Image (spheres, helix red, strand yellow):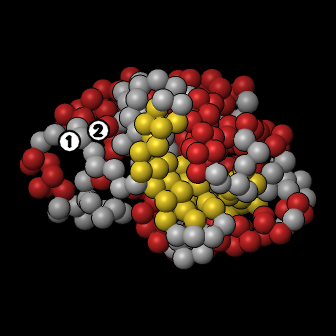
């Protein structure tokens, strides 16, 4: 399934990477989650671009970047570090949603260009995740079905009548899923579970010591909001809960999430007082 880029295709160590930039000012890097793309941040970018240089990247195995290797968070982070170097960007506020949170933390470990972190909709590990039974088997099968359906004209026609869509193109989420590398399912559901059990994200936040904001949706269907709030708060991160929304708060309440990001960007840019372990 062909996708049309909305940004530039950068050569990063021989890999063509899709990058979109909007606005001017202090830089914010937005990293999408599993089966996502730069389009997941279309509405959020509208609330940020007036005061920030907003950089969006299609991760490896996703969107217009594509690829089927180097899909783990560390490899993804190396690719994103190459993007920041190519763009000459310093002192970046990096926001990662879901699997993108893993990539954001891995990026902060290897790149001095990261000044602060925002984790959106992601628990520290899978210890209380509420994924459907058999997800490791059913999700790859469902992904194959989605890729097949996304090629059908009648699906695009029927999508016009969806009651709720958070995208300009009501078929956007289906299209993004269809072009995601099939092997990403194992990376997210199997490999990631083992990795996070060994080294949870809250432990990584504590080790990095960078200013960190966590944004959660009260109605997240994958992770218990209160437990996640407690885990990140315990390591000194600032945690904000957006009421009435689920796993992707920036889709349902882009204005509120944009405000939180703008405010955090100002605070984290003033001094090291906002580092993890200090009071906000």
Above or below residue 232? Residue 2 is above
Mark before the other along the chain sequence, 1 or 2:
1
Q: Is residue 271 left or right of residue 232?
A: right
Q: Quadrant of the C terminus?
A: bottom right
Residue with the most extreme left position: 154
For this rendering, which residue is in front, 240 or 20? 20
Q: In this view, does 85 lie to the left or right of 40?
A: right
Q: In which quarter of the image is the N terminus?
A: top left
In percent of width and height, residue 83 lies at 57, 44
In percent of width and height, residue 277 lies at 89, 53
Circle number at residue 150: 1
Q: In this view, does 161 lie to the left or right of 187?
A: left
In percent of width and height, residue 9 lies at 41, 45
Circle 1 Cα neighbour tier, 10 Å, few/some/many (<14 / 14–19 / ≥20): some
Above or below residue 220? Residue 42 is below
For this rendering, which residue is in front, 104 or 233? 104
Task: Say which residue appears at 68% left-offset and 37% top-offset.
Answer: 106
Q: Do callouts 1 and 2 mark residues in contact (Cβ within 8 Å)?
A: yes
Task: Say which residue appears at 46% left-offset and 50% top-offset.
Answer: 19
For this rendering, which residue is in front, 180 or 221? 180
- Please count the marks in the image: 2
Task: Say which residue appears at 78% left-offset and 70% top-offset.
Answer: 267
The residue that label 2 is drawn on is 178
Q: Is residue 219 visible?
A: no
Give the SS element for disc 2. helix
């Amino acid at each position: 399934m062909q996708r049309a880029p909305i940004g530039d295709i950068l050569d990063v160590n021989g890999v063509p990477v899709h990058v979109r930039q909007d606005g001017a000012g202090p830089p914010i890097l937005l990293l999408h989650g599993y089966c996502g793309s730069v389009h997941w941040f279309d509405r959020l970018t509208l609330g940020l671009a007036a005061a920030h240089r907003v950089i969006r990247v299609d991760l490896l195995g996703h969107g217009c970047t594509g690829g089927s290797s180097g899909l783990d968070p560390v490899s993804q982070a190396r690719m994103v570090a190459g993007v920041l170097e190519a763009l000459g960007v310093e002192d970046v506020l990096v926001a990662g949603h879901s699997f993108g949170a893993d990539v954001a933390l891995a990026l902060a470990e290897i790149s001095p260009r990261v000044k602060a972190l925002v984790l959106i909709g992601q628990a520290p590990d899978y210890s209380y995740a509420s994924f459907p039974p058999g997800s490791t088997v059913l999700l790859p099968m469902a992904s194959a079905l989605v890729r097949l359906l996304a090629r059908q004209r009648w699906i695009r026609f029927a999508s016009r009548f969806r009651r709720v869509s958070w995208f300009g193109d009501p078929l956007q989420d289906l299209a993004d899923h269809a072009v995601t590398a099939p092997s990403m399912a194992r990376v997210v559901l199997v490999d990631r579970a083992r990795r996070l059990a060994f080294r949870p994200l809250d432990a990584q936040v504590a080790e990095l010591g960078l200013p960190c904001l966590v944004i959660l949706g009260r109605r997240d269907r994958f992770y218990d909001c209160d437990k996640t709030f407690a885990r990140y708060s315990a390591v000194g991160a600032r945690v904000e809960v957006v009421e009435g929304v689920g796993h992707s708060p920036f889709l349902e309440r882009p204005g509120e999430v944009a405000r939180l990001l703008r405010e955090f960007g100002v605070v984290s840019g003033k001094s090291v007082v906002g580092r993890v372990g200090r009071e906000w």
